[in-house]
Image: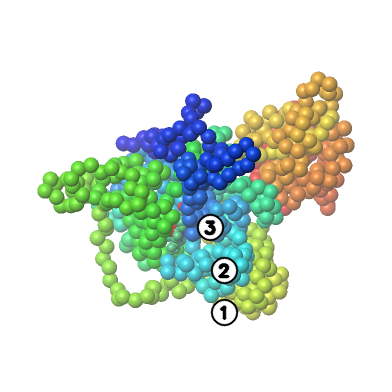
Amino acid sequence: MASKTAKTEQLRATMVEPTTKDRITADFGTRQSNTDDWLRVSTDDRIGPSLLEDAFGREKIHRFDHERIPERVVHARGAGAFGTFRLLESAEDVTHAGVLTDTSRETPVFLRFSTVLGSRGSADTVRDVRGFALKMYTDEGNWDIVGNNIPVFFIQDAMKFPDLIHAGKPEPDNEIPQAQSAHNNFWDFAYSHSEATHMFMWAMSDRGIPRSFRMMQGFGVNTFTLINAKGEQHFVKFHFTPELGVHSLVWDEALKIAGQDPDFHRKDLHTAIESGAYPKWKFGIQVIPESKQDDFEFDILDATKVWPEELVPIRYIGELELNRNVDEYFTETEQVAFCTSHVVPGIGFSDDPLLQGRNFSYFDTQISRLGINWQELPINKPVCPVMNFNRDGGMRHTIAKGKINYWPNRFEVQPAATEKEGGYVEHPAQVKGIKTRGKSHKFKEHFNQAQLFYNSMSEIEKSHIKAALSFELDHCDDPIVYERMSKRLADIDLDLAKSVSTMVGGPSPPPSSRPNHGKKTKGLSQLEFMPAQATIATRKVAILIADGYDPIAFAAIVAALKMAQAIPVVLGPRRSAIYAANEDRASGKGVVPDHHFEGQRSTLFDAIFLPGGKESVATLVKMGRVTHYIREAFGHLKTIAATGEAVDLIKNAIQLDGVQLSQDSDVMESYGVVTLRDAKPGSLREVIHVGKSAKHFL
Ligand code: HDE
């Protein structure tokens, strides 16, 4: 059985790491004596022409000229990491796949997160769907689950995909806007495809602006099948639920971070793994036996529909952990290539018309991105043996020895495996119907689940959806687009439609012929996905100080945060030593902040803390940037805490109407603001406690 480090060991064989003992060579191995000056005809007085004969110069430039490969046509921007999949409970009642039945296995994996619409250099925090593409290097071959953080899709038929993506990507005449759905073409498409209604509601919800890749769900979206040892087939949907809960940014924060730190999500993932705070997800399956496939009011093969959990509960059977960053971005994260069609025995495909098209598309796109031998690239290679008579093609690496490159052959070399030997045998499904471009009638219903989703949101989440739609349609300047969309929203909910149309200048929508059915279901509001154990671990807390700060409160909060595995980040007016009250400034010690106030903005932290200290607070109160820090963090619903003199600083900065923050020495918490006039030992626990709540919704 392959071990959980099998993939890492396999990759290690292809790695090189330069040392000081090495000398630069050309790709053909010869050591170079000069890598800076092209060979030329030259004298001390006059420089002459460069010589084409310089093979070293030519090679260096050739290699550079050809460094770029086509970026992915969608999901171009991504970040990935290695990890382990552990099965906690066997699913042998529904599948005979080793990876889902053998609880002693630890399967190595690679997971790539991505945005969909932006190009490779776009920002992480744009409003978009996020990719969640998992490659499991199982003993029986690679199993790819190429999923998203949203459980449904915009379209029902793969043939619509080019139109969807053309409409969502920058418009063709001027290539504007980058990494946004907020433009005429996208919403024109959304209107003309009512099947997109459910998914655009998800994309407009907080799911479209996740706080971290580590705090997102993953969904296989399409309906796959599982086949057990008795040959019985079940339909299945795959779920990954993050241990840290599902959290989002607020929109203003997301917009600002896109400029302030476009790498926000990939840094967050990288830092968490480097620090040993390995992100984890529970792995679950929703299963429907073949005999029950027609029992639902929606078609279970329609990727624009969820399987409501009341009807089909999720059975959690495994755990996914990410625990190793890549060694090199290009060869691993960029060259990793997924295929929905890559499954292992015991797992199969349904007739989901989106999935069927995807099964064609992924292999095909890798050919233009990486070449026909893309599966030989180290990151894509299975950990189990690969032996067949596929041969040659551009950039073939494997050297296949022997005379035989065909089957059958007189030596009986490499016959196909029997089922017992682990051969993949397609489920003998009965197929009937007539050749047509139509779909079954249930595919025609497009609004029930959009309503179900909206109704299942909390009031806060609903208000965020209204704001998001108002933002997006405000960016559409063609009246036909925002007017028609205003009308379309009434097919979901009249109140939603009215408030958005008022904001964007659409007509007041008439009641729809299909009023909101009022039904809700569980598992859709992300507020249901708070972690079982609230934690502040891996959250970044900014500590704002100036000369004369209170060293006791400072040291106490740093220690308390570290104990709780949070990340304290010290900020000051300058990135050179800051001295505590009564500290001997001539001693040259002090605390050197990690950043100055201009270097890192409040948006990049989950909470802020201001220790007291008369002189420090007197300096900070005069700094507009600090007042802005506090107000912005408050506006973004973050925990803000202060001790001693800094209590008045935050109170004045926030100026809460009608909210009484404490005037005395008690610990006080309100709206996520913690004030501790006297920082007593132990009272800082309150800060940690409040900090565990990611956002404080008013
Ligand atoms: Fe993809 N999709 N897709 N997609 N998709 C690609 O494959 C495609 C769809 C998803 O990190 C491409 O290797 C079609 C659904 C992810 O490398 C391409 C259809 C879901 C990634 C492609 C869909 C996804 C891709 C581009 C409609 C969620 C990034 C580069 C039938 C379940 C994988 C590539 C990575 C990438 C085609 C719909 C998720 C062109 C035709 C539904 C996470 O092959």
Between 641 and 363, the one nearer to me in the picture: 363
Q: Amino acid at mark 2?
A: Pro
> How far, Cα to Cα, is label 3 from label 1?
34 Å
Sequence-first tag of 1 and 2: 2
Q: Find the residue positioned furthest to the left.
A: 410
Can you identify the residue that label 3 sits on? 116
Local crowd size for mark 3, using a 10 Å CA cut-off: few (<14), some (14–19), many (≥20) = many
Q: Is residue 665 left or right of residue 498?
A: right
Q: Is residue 325 left or right of residue 470?
A: left
Please indicate, yes or no, whether residue 177 appears anywhere in the rendered image. yes
Secondary structure category for the residue under label 1 = loop
Instruction: In the rendered structure, find residue 172 and report the number of the disc placed on it.
Output: 2
Q: Amino acid at mark 1?
A: Ser
Sequence-first tag of 3 and 1: 3
Q: Amino acid at mark 3?
A: Val
Name the quarter where the N terminus is drawn.
Answer: top left
Q: Is residue 513 left or right of residue 589?
A: left
Q: Nearer the viewer, mark 1 or mark 2?
A: 2
Local crowd size for mark 2, using a 10 Å CA cut-off: few (<14), some (14–19), many (≥20) = few
> How far, Cα to Cα, is label 1 from label 2?
36 Å
Q: Nearer the viewer, mark 2 or mark 3?
A: 2
- Residue 555: x and y in percent read 73, 27
Q: Nearer the viewer, mark 3 or mark 1?
A: 3
Instruction: In the rendered structure, find residue 135 and report the number of the disc placed on it.
Output: none
Circles 2 and 3, Cβ within 8 Å, touching? The answer is: no
- Mark 3 C-beta to ligand 1 under 8 Å: yes
Residue for point 65% across, 62% down: 468
Residue for point 48% across, 46% down: 52
Can you identify the residue that label 1 sits on? 513
- Residue 520: x and y in percent read 55, 62
